[in-house]
Amino acid sequence: MLPDEPRPTADRSPEAGLPGCYRHPQTPTGVSCTRCERPICPHCMVAASVGFQCPECVGDGHAGARRATTRFGGALAADGGLVTRVLIGINVVVWVLAAYVLTPRLGQTWFLVSLGAGVDGGPAGIADGPHQWYRLLTATFLHLEWWHVGMNMLVLFWLGPALEQALGRLRFLALYLVAGLGGSIFTFLVAGHEMKSLGASGAIFGLIGATIVMQLRDKGPLGPAMAFLVFNLIVTFSRPGIDWRAHIGGLLLGSLTAAGLMYAPRERRGLVQALTVVGALAVEAGMLLAGMALYGA
């Protein structure tokens, strides 16, 4: 209904002595819309904070209302930890397949060559000749030891839901994948053909960095998150067999991406956040090209 169009009047019902509903004139009613004061029958009543409103007034009110979002602009969801659980499920399923189902039939080498980044003894992203750069991402979902997948998924279970609820599902997933891929590519840039990297540790370190950024943004307590980061860095550099490059790469890319997502100005939030993710991917593409030039991959 146009703003200047006169509201339709309701007919009186002679039998009941009450006005008829403006949408159903033959139905007498003693209730009026609290906004436009037109009579409305029980079929047309929409409960409001005070009294009832007609369907048109409710529609007009919803048209001017802003869509509810998370703290950093994501779509609001009833279940704030769905993506976290899905990621945990994928990692656990791939680990079970690698450890107990396919390895006895096809051998561990099949998994390493198909999903691992450089762990088959050849150049990162290259298996049996053809370039397979997708392995830089798929390697972040591959674990061979129970303690490895267990520790990574435990940290994801701790940190993931809070970040997902604050960012929204899509932004959280983008952060996780950018951090994981950044860890693999940074490892390739530093180690080249000596790269032997598996697991979600790069993505997990990215979530640790994002948690610190969120605490800074909210002016919350930094002590627990910083202590957790320092502890994990000590373990990273003190134990053999841990790829520190994936951890540092994931931490840097995850922290920078989180900063762009969380500090984006409200009036241009969507644009700045999209450019942040694109910019992070561009940085990773630049590191990958630099690594290819250095190592002739």
Image (tube, rainbow, N blue to C red):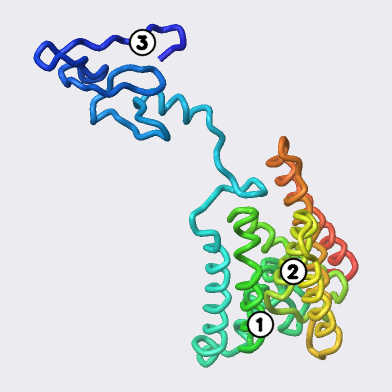
Q: Position of residue 203 (x, y in %)?
A: 71, 69
Q: Are marks 3 and 2 in contact (CB under 8 Å)?
A: no
Q: Residue at x 56, y 88 (%)?
A: 99
Residue that mark 1 sits on: 151
Q: Position of residue 149 (x, y in %)?
A: 63, 82
Between 129 and 193, which is closer to the camera in this rendering? 193
Whole-number angstrom distance, CA of label 3 to CA of label 2: 58 Å
Q: Position of residue 267 (x, y in %)?
A: 72, 35
Residue that mark 2 sits on: 208
Q: Is residue 192 left or right of residue 104?
A: right
Q: Residue at x 77, y 72 (%)?
A: 224
Sequence-wise, which precedes: disc 3 or disc 1? 3
Q: Label 1 is placed on what type of residue? A: Met
Q: Residue at x 64, y 76 (%)?
A: 115
Whole-number angstrom distance, CA of label 1 to CA of label 2: 14 Å
Q: Label 3 is placed on what type of residue? A: Arg
Judge the density around disc 3: few (<14), some (14-19), many (≥20) Cα neighbours within 10 Å.
Answer: few
Between 7 and 265, which is closer to the camera in this rendering? 7
- Residue at the far left in the pictured view: 15
Q: Label 2 is placed on what type of residue? A: Ile
Between 78 and 148, which is closer to the camera in this rendering? 78
Whole-number angstrom distance, CA of label 3 to CA of label 1: 65 Å
In the depicted structure, whether residue 101 falls above or below residue 9: below
In the depicted structure, whether residue 2 falls above or below residue 193: above
Residue that mark 3 sits on: 7
